[in-house]
């Protein structure tokens, strides 16, 4: 394992997180997807007050059933040789996290972290457009994955954003991040979100610092 991988493993092990097998992940990911659909239905519903109250009680009963056996912390799966980690409950693309936008990040051979995704109304800020904090969160994750894939993972120390034009929701978006350079424990990464017309909506630069312990 590389120094970077070992360092991130120490960080994660100190959090006492469990790992799940593929079958467990698949089952919970399907549940999380159903809850995502529920979340969207809550925002859009027009059913009457009596029906809302009945559904509220059913949801509370389901929450009680799930809570019958609880982990103290959400689980993680694995730390790669390069220090990359699959955080199942991540608020960005975490398959077990029902509030996570569906952002599946792929690292390309040249080290670019890339994601294609469509955000629904749950992530709306200005009407018709994505909330700026959501864009920042997605970019932070993408930037972090690019830093990890470079073998230089770390904590976000700085995150600078330039919102060039509104990011629409309900249409396909692309986000990309690539390492610019490293200086000792610091890794500098650039990223952007691109709209369906091919124009950049948000640009970001970040500095990640590898924790010493
Ligand atoms: C986790 C799974 C991931 C797995 C990857 C998956 C992707 C995850 C993406 C999400 C990432 C996050 O959200 S992370 C969460 C948000 N970020 C945080 O909470 C970070 C909180 N801050 C920290 O933990 C700490 O401040 C660190 C680790 C950033 C730095 O602490 P440190 O290690 O003690 O650093 P220190 O020795 O003081 O400084 C080292 C060098 O960096 C510079 N430096 C340090 N901090 C800053 C700063 N904010 N702004 C400018 N410069 C700074 C110093 O000047 C120094 O430069 P010189 O004198 O050497 O020149």
Image: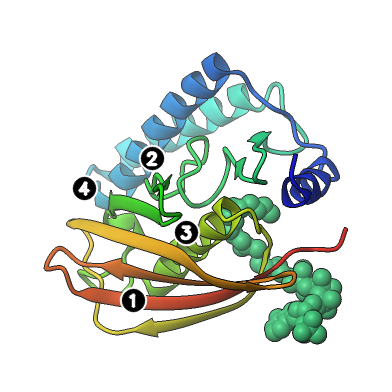
Q: Image quarter for residue 171?
A: bottom left
**What is the CA distance from the residue labelled 2 to the residue labelled 4?**
18 Å
Question: Circle 4 sits on which residue?
Answer: 46
Task: Choose the circle earlier in sequence order: 1 or 2.
Answer: 2
**What is the CA distance from the residue labelled 3 to the residue labelled 4?**
36 Å
- State the residue at coordinates (37%, 45%): 102
| Mark 1 element type | strand
Q: Is residue 198 left or right of residue 213?
A: left
Q: Is residue 112 above or below residue 190?
A: above
Task: Choose the circle earlier in sequence order: 2 or 4.
Answer: 2
Q: Image quarter for residue 12?
A: top right
Residue 130 seen = no
Nearer to us: label 2 or label 4:
2
Relative image position of residue 92 (x, y in whole percent)? 48, 52
| Mark 4 element type | loop
Q: Image quarter for residue 184?
A: bottom right
Q: Which mark is residue 202?
A: 1
Relative image position of residue 4 (x, y in whole percent)? 73, 52
Q: Which mark is residue 142?
A: 3
């Amino acid at each position: 394992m590389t120094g970077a991988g070992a360092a991130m493993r120490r960080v994660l092990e100190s959090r006492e997180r469990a790992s799940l097998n593929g079958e467990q992940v698949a089952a919970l990911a399907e549940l999380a997807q159903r809850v995502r659909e529920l979340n969207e239905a809550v925002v859009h519903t027009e059913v009457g007050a009596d029906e809302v109250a009945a559904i509220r009680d059913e949801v509370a009963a389901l929450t009680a059933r799930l809570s019958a056996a609880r982990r103290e912390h959400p689980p993680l799966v694995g730390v790669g040789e390069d220090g990359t980690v699959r955080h199942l409950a991540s608020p960005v693309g975490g398959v077990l996290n029902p509030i996570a936008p569906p952002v599946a990040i792929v690292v390309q051979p040249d080290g670019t972290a890339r994601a294609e995704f469509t955000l629904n109304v749950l992530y709306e800020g200005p009407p018709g457009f994505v909330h700026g904090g959501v864009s920042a969160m997605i970019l932070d994750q993408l930037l972090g994955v690019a830093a990890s894939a470079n073998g230089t993972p770390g904590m976000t120390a700085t995150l600078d954003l330039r919102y060039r034009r509104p990011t629409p929701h309900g249409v396909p978006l692309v986000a990309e991040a690539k390492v610019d350079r490293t200086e000792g424990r610091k890794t500098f990464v650039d990223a952007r979100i691109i709209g369906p017309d091919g124009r950049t909506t948000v640009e970001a630069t970040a500095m990640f610092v590898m924790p010493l312990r």
